[in-house]
Image (spheres, helix red, strand yellow):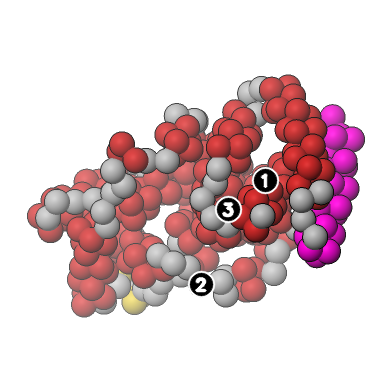
Amino acid sequence: MHKAKHSKFRNTGILFELLTRQVTSDILSGKDESFAKNILFKYFSESKELGKELQLYNFLVNEVAKDETQAEKYIEIVLKQRDKLNQKSLTSEKYNLIKEIKDVYPINDLFKSSIKNYKVLASIYKIFENHGDKNSKFDVKEIVTSRTCIVENLCGIKKVNKETEDEMINVYKQQNEEVRLLSYKILVESLNEKYKDLDSNQKNLLKEYINSISNTNSLKTLIDSEVTNVKKQLAELTNKISDDVIKIKINETVKQLDNVKKFNLVKDNQVMVLLLSYELIKEIKNQI
């Protein structure tokens, strides 16, 4: 029996978080295809053991308990659910996932990124490993500290009022597991962090993007229509401003929008161009 340590490389919650960040980075870099997105779909679907374990991580990160007693019950229930996972398959999937990441990305650089919920995710990993592997035990004090951290997290986070919950979150929750991995986590969260609140045009585009796996024609039709509409708005705004820097931004944006309409197949970076065009329109209108 050996004393165990936390491993970021084997922490399912951290792996998922870093990969979703990488997808966002790939999209913002204008890459036509994101390898990170492909392996997210491959390894974190609801049919995979990694996908099932991720759901358990997410429950302990996002759920709210009314008191410590209920929080402890949540932990016990989650541990029992994890016992039902195929541990051999889970280990194999995790090994293959890390191998594929190493083949494409400088993995040490990838894991240098700071994680907002790192302490909670590390605590979940420790109680999972301590509970599931009889040969790998953490120090008793460390496990107590980890459980306390999870309990405090469950008791301390307040859920958003259902009546004011963002429309995009409701759309997100209705999608199947594979689509949810990309749609809300990557696009809505990352854009809300980088920019102000999304407007109705951006939300509508994201909604169509979420549904595009089953209806690509609908998304293409919307994008073609919105590109024409956005270019018209930008042309009108150009006549109302005198700032040369803003005019340069508009000209460059129009060039990017022209490129979007040239392709029959919608790609991630084209969706991003349109989203950023909406953001530019908001920026200009705020200055007029």
Write down the region rendered in magenta. 243-267
Name the mark nearer the viewer: 2 or 3.
3
- Marker count (numbered): 3
User: Of residues 166 and 182, which is closer to you in this image?
Assistant: 166
Instruction: Give the structural element (helix, strand or loop) at label 1.
Output: helix
Q: Amino acid at mark 3?
A: Leu
Q: Secondary structure at mark 2?
A: loop
- The overriding secondary structure of the stretch rendered in magenta is helix
- Quick one: 112 or 259, which is closer to the camera? 259
Residue 17 drawn above or below residue 200: below
Note whether residue 268 is visible.
Answer: no
> Which numbered disc, 1 or 3, marks the residue that appears first in the sequence?
3
Q: Is residue 211 magenta?
A: no
Residue 285 lies, in percent from the top left, at 65, 51
Residue that numbered label 1 is attached to: 278
Quarter placement of the N terminus:
bottom left
Q: Which residue is mark 2?
A: 114
Q: For mark 3, does the 10 Å Cα neighbourhood hold few (<14), some (14 to 19), or many (20 or more) residues?
A: some
Tell me the distance, in whole angstroms, between the alpha carbons under discs 2 and 3: 18 Å
Whole-percent x, y for residue 45 in the image: 52, 39
Residue shown at the point (16%, 55%) measured from the top left = 72
Q: Is residue 136 left or right of residue 25?
A: left
188 left or right, relative to 257: left
Res. 215 visible in picture: yes
Residue 248 part of the magenta segment: yes
Q: CA distance from mark 1 to mark 3?
A: 12 Å
Image quadrant containing the C terminus: bottom right
Q: Give residue 181's position: percent from left, percent from top.
A: 53, 43
- CA gap, disc 1 and disc 2: 30 Å
